[in-house]
Image (tube, rainbow, N blue to C red):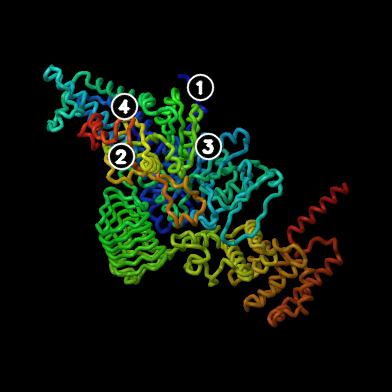
Amino acid sequence: MAPKDNNVQEEEPLQAVIITDSFNNRYKPLTLDRPRCLLPLGNMPIIDYTLEFLAASQVQEIFILSCYLSDMVRDYIKNSRWVKSTLPPKIHTIATQECYSVGDALRELDAKQLLRGDFILVSGDVISNVKLDAILEEHKKRRETDKNCIMTMVLKKASPTHRLRAQGEESLYILDSKTNQCIHCEPLELYPQKNKFKVDVDAFENHPKVQIRNDLIDCQIDICSLEVPALFTENFDYQDMRKDFVRGILQSDILGKTIYCHVLTDQYAARAKSTKMYDAISKDVISRWTFPLTPDSNIQLGDNYRHSRNQIYKDQSVILARSAKLVEKVIVGANTEIGENSRISNSTIGHNCKIGDNVVIENSYIWDNVVIESNCNIYKSFIADNAHIWENVNVKKGCMISYNVEVGPNVDVDEFTKLTLHEPDNDTDYTEISNYQKLGEKSKAYLWEDKSSEDDDDEYDKNEKLTIAMSYLGRENVVQEYDDLDDSDVSSSSDEDELFLDDEAIQQKNNREIIATLERAFAENHSIENAALELNTLKMACNIQFRDLRVLAIPAVLSRIDADNPAQKIIERWGPLIAKFIHSDEDQVDAIYSIQKFCAKSEYHSKMLAVILKIFYDIDVLDEDNIIQWYGKSATEESLTEKERAIRTTALPLIQWLQSAEEESESDEDDEDDEDEEESEEEDDDDSEEESEESDE
Amino acid sequence: MVLDNQVDLLISKLKRRQIVNSGQAAIQTAYLMRMVIAATKSHQADKLIDTVKEIGKRLVSAQPMELVVGNIIRRVLHIIREEYTTIVRQEQNKIPQFPSSSSTMFNLLETSDDIDYSNTFYDFKQLVIDGIKDLIDELETQEQNIANQALEHIHSNEIIMTLNNSGTVQAYLKQAAKTRTFQVIVADTSPTHEGQVMAKALASAGIETTLIPDSAIFAVMSRVNKVILGSHTVTANGGLIACAGSRTIATAAKYHSTPVVVCIGLYKLSPQYPFDIEEYNLCVSPDQVYTYDEGDILEKVDIINPYYEYVPPELVSLFITNVGPQPPTYMYRLLNEFYSKEDFEI
């Protein structure tokens, strides 16, 4: 049979890409031993929901990209029914090393050249029953009329306070009412809270009718054309799909690419982004919003669930004591035994669990092979595989008890405790519980604290902290529960209602951030350009003035001067950074005041005022006129302290020298060989000389 | 390999609910069974039975709600057993015996001796395949067979009520409309609103059709002469597992002593007895009942959207099947005609 080219093109197999990494730590410590996509939700690994969703949408070929614990993902897929089945989709797992963001993953994909046409891009934690056929058709049609349309984002409609909306991670979208073209996408961060944002006026000129929508959940199901990975390769600084890529494309006039949205109203789609979302999605699965992806569809081999009244899903092999009660919204997995007088509601119990007598479990997620002895209470918590809870243990809300941990007997586990078997290493990520009494005699566990995230260089800002804090199971609401967020989650500030900060507090926050940015620049030896860019961005974000930056940057730079690092070295290195924030003569004078203030504060630096000013003068940050002006002015300035006045006089020799130098230079202007002149100036002058010579000729 | 592929395909279609129509499910299962028989190398009846049972088990567990799949498997097993015993009898006696089919009552008290299914007969497989072919023919023509009886039950100027969009009922009414004039009232069948589709189809066939909301069923019932329903499956006791809303209409009809006529192909008759009637109320996504957009309410309200519901046999007056009209009390007898007792449990 001779292949006909036309036919071959038409029947191109539909491909999908799953990126299993989340690039954040929302599920830790549960994800220390198992990647997020393999965590069970409703007693089935999350990735199976994603695969089932894609398979039901007639996807022929799926690429699973994983970095973190990629071996486990590969092994799981290798032994799963997907590979054994003779039906499409065909699944390939690709382990990517050194992959820190969606951007990296897509660049890797682009390099491999595996994709042949439009593809579906999802993350490994999507749970959905959407039929993509219609959306794909829509996308294809659009591509015919608008060649520049490179992506269709699938968004789900939900009220702004919906339990599926991850606070701090959602965005506000501006869509064209007619075509659903996405015009603008503004992330809604918890901090700093914005009351306004800017949109290009052109947007409104081109689109007579727009909708501004705050009722859309980003399901992170994207229908992408081949240009998308290519664009990621071209723009190697794109990291996040939404924050960088979508915004970048929408704001770029040069590329001229367009992005459309498809708003789902009647089908289900969500991402298990955090433990709180995991909770919400589990409830939706139990309430059958995800139908046919419900436990009683027995998608996994070996399951035999039956659905009965009050949304109870019980495997046929469950052994339930006569007086045990499954109240409502419960999933109980195969071969689990539940003892007398136990009450279980709104929970999922995994396979092969043993639950003793008089146990109360509410709103919790208990995975496989867990043993819970008699008289335990478990509320709003996670208990991972093979954990053992001894008698009379009271697990309070928000706990995460990781794999193989043992707790008890006769103890209370405090709220939001995270226990793991991972040995604490020297990074002090973990705090060993020296006092075993606290978790009971038979306990085997280390306390795990979320400190690793603080090592993150970028992005780990206030918003991230708040978002994470909000994303844990058991957190009800930003305002109400704010005061019980633990210190490690939020910040050192003791402010109770930080979300409604007064101006002063906001300023303090901003200051802290700027200083942190500076510290990082010093520590990592950033170039002046990069550091300045970063600070400028912060300035925009925090809505502050150059003066504020200067006031903070000057002390930060000067305080690095010590016996090991002479003033000359430090200022020559970082002085130009300060110069970036000085734009006029007034600024210069103001900067000198700042320097004066700083020097007055410490004994060590107080003698160095003149030296510091001299160096700043040398590197051309400060002009002699302004220094002289400052000297004159500060004599009469009343706001200065005693100390500041005192050190002012130490600058006298410099002033005298400057004045004399000025006179000198005035007297013979033509003399270019001033030793003190900066090199660049010399060059400039040389250039001008040359030019003039040329023009003479 | 091809066979495995086909089995997997049907299983996944059933699981993903890509086949919801019971007629479709039945025909596809029958075709698959024909492939299974053809692909089995052995000519021994017991091997065939084992193979069919093994695949049958997988299909049934794929979607336990879809009882017709199990029915077809039982029918195929029955065909194998029947063909085998016929051959054995012929071989043994060479005398045409009185057919000892279980459909008669003569052997009611007889202990069925265990038949040895291990002998091999030439052409046996071909006979089974022919049997399945007949079954497929039956499945494909049953709708027409039922429709052909329409004139016996629908009279001129009658008012008939129905709901949902059943293919069998639609064909039945359209057939009657060719010679008789009558009125049809279709209930909307919220939340699927399939009644609207039915009303449109009937109206375009020239039948005087009225669409009413489900809430008006009882009010309108006093004017109705006959209720004609379709059903997803029929249980061993003559009860229905039909689309949600059927019980409302049947109860209203009972109150007004209006006869309820159910049109079904006999492949829908299942030997399963509805011990737990709620088990068959397959609940689908509550999406059609309430939008997911309002998050706060979802926390506090359980929304349940059953797709099927059980209608007890007392509410049904008559079944119109492809082998003629049958009263509900007689359904259990028909079971013995189509299935072997040993296959009731697959």
The alpha-carbon separation of the residues under discs 2 and 4 comes to 18 Å
Give the Cα separation between the discs numbered 3 and 1: 24 Å
| Residues at discs 2 and 1 in contact (Cβ within 8 Å) | no
Q: Chain of mark 3?
A: A
Could you tell me how far apart the alpha carbons at marks 2 and 1 are, in whole angstroms? Answer: 59 Å
CA gap, disc 3 and disc 2: 46 Å
Q: Which element is circle 4 on?
A: strand
Q: Residues within 10 Å of mark 1 (few under 14, many from 20)?
A: few
Instruction: For the N terminus of chain A, give its image quadrant.
Output: top left
Output the chain of dot 4: B
Dot 2 or dot 4, earlier in sequence: 2
Total marks drawn? 4
Which of discs 4 and 3 lies nearer the camera? The answer is 4
Q: Which residue is mark 2?
A: B313
Q: Nearer the viewer, mark 3 or mark 1?
A: 3
Give the vertical position of B165 relative to B248 (above or below).
Answer: above
Q: Residue at x 42, y 26 (%)?
A: B176
- The chain under label 2 reads B
What is the chain identity of the residue bearing mark 1?
A
Check residue B324 in the rendering and tell me which mark sits there, or answer none: 4
Identify the amino acid type marked 1: Lys
Q: Residues within 10 Å of mark 3 (few under 14, many from 20)?
A: some
Helix, strand or loop at label 2? It is: helix
Q: Note whether A284 is above or below B319 in the view shown.
A: below
Please name the residue that numbered disc 3 is placed on.
Answer: A136
Q: Amino acid at mark 4?
A: Gly
- Tell me the number on the disc at residue A4: 1
Q: Earlier in the sequence, mark 3 or mark 1?
A: 1
CB atoms of marks 3 and 2 within 8 Å? no
Element type where label 3 sits in the image: helix
Single out the residue that lies furthest toward the bottom: A642
